[in-house]
Amino acid sequence: MGKKYGLGKGLGALIPEEKSNNEEDKREYVELNKLKINTNQPRKYFDNEKISELAESIKQHGIIQPILVNRDGEFFNIVAGERRFRAAKLIGLEKVPVIEMNLDDKEILEVSLIENIQRQDLNAIEEAKAYKQLLTEFKIVQEELSAIIGKSRTAISNTLRLLNLDEKVQQYIIEGVLSEGHGRALLGIQNKDNQYKVAEKIIDEKLSVRETERLIKKLNEDQTTTKKEPAGNEMNPYYKDIKNRLQDYFGTKVNINKKKNRGKIEIEYYSEDDLQRILEIMNL
């Protein structure tokens, strides 16, 4: 192989900074079956349709930007360029252009993260998990991470907060069913089961981020009002437990009005679709 390249001071750039009049000094062609996918790649979700589009482009123009790799015996671990690798494999290329780097595990993750961020290829959850790995596994601080990826500490903190969402909600964001904005709004709900229930409502009713924010604000206001009921109207713990279980079950506000040996249960809904959702839960 040609000369190896490190990241350079301050993580240089994704493509080696050294220049050469002879392109072959840094670019080599290796057999596709010698490349191995990086298991620490931040990006876990690949859109097959977009991979197919990239494959068609490669058919016409070839691979313009070489794949960055680290040598591993007779094989090469992909540092950056897994989409190009997948597309090349799809159309049956035997060899692809690569540039061999000389990076440790921390630098590999940093390069992969930077490339994906610059190409806007990561979804918010993948990005958050990569941040967390750099912060915990490699013990770097947010200030250093900010310098590495070119994002403010506030932006990093806000992205990391998405990992506090229910795992099923996180998966919806990974799959593009919910947006990052929806995820941020759902952080306004502390209970993860309720986060999921509201997420289902967002999807079913195709709520915008703004509509979601208004819904969550109302739910929180209703909960606050319930907590501020006068002490004289304090509900018996037995009925309070039933009320909480019903609210969790239906994903909406429930009132229990008890009078001696009788009473009534009120289940609130906020739209016709919400009513239909509740009826389906009741198998009606």
Image (cartoon, grey):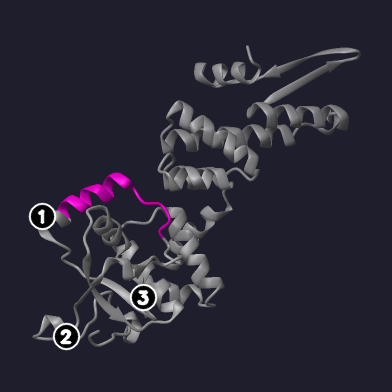
The x and y percentages for residue 169 are 53, 43
- The first of marks 3 and 2 along the sequence is 2
- The first of marks 2 and 1 along the sequence is 2
Please report the bounds of the magenta region as a residue range: 43-57
Find numbered disc 1 in the image and state the secondary structure of the residue it sits on.
helix
Q: Amino acid at mark 1?
A: Gln
Which disc is residue 60 wearing?
1
Q: How many marks?
A: 3
Residue at x 40%, y 52% (from the top left corner): 45
Q: Which residue is mark 2?
A: 25
Which disc is residue 75 wearing?
3
Q: Is residue 21 visible?
A: yes
Horizontal arrangement in the rendering, residue 144 relative to residue 26 (left or right): right
Find numbered disc 3 in the image and state the secondary structure of the residue it sits on.
strand
* Quarter of the C terminus within the rendering: top right
How packed is label 2: few (under 14 Cα within 10 Å), some, or many (20 or more)?
some
Which quadrant holds residue 124?
Answer: bottom left
The x and y percentages for residue 257 are 79, 18
Based on the picture, tell me whether residue 50 belongs to the magenta stretch: yes
Return the residue found at the far right.
260
Q: Main secondary structure of the magenta part?
A: helix
* Quarter of the N terminus within the rendering: bottom left
Seen from the viewer's position, the closer of residues 94 and 256 is 94
Q: Amino acid at mark 2?
A: Asp
Horizontal arrangement in the rendering, residue 248 relative to residue 259 (left or right): left
Return the residue found at the far left.
21
Work out how far the residue at label 3 is from the one at label 2, CA to CA, in angstroms: 20 Å
Query: 97 above or below 213?
Result: below
Residue at x 36%, y 75% (from the top left corner): 75
Seen from the viewer's position, the closer of residues 212 and 27 is 27
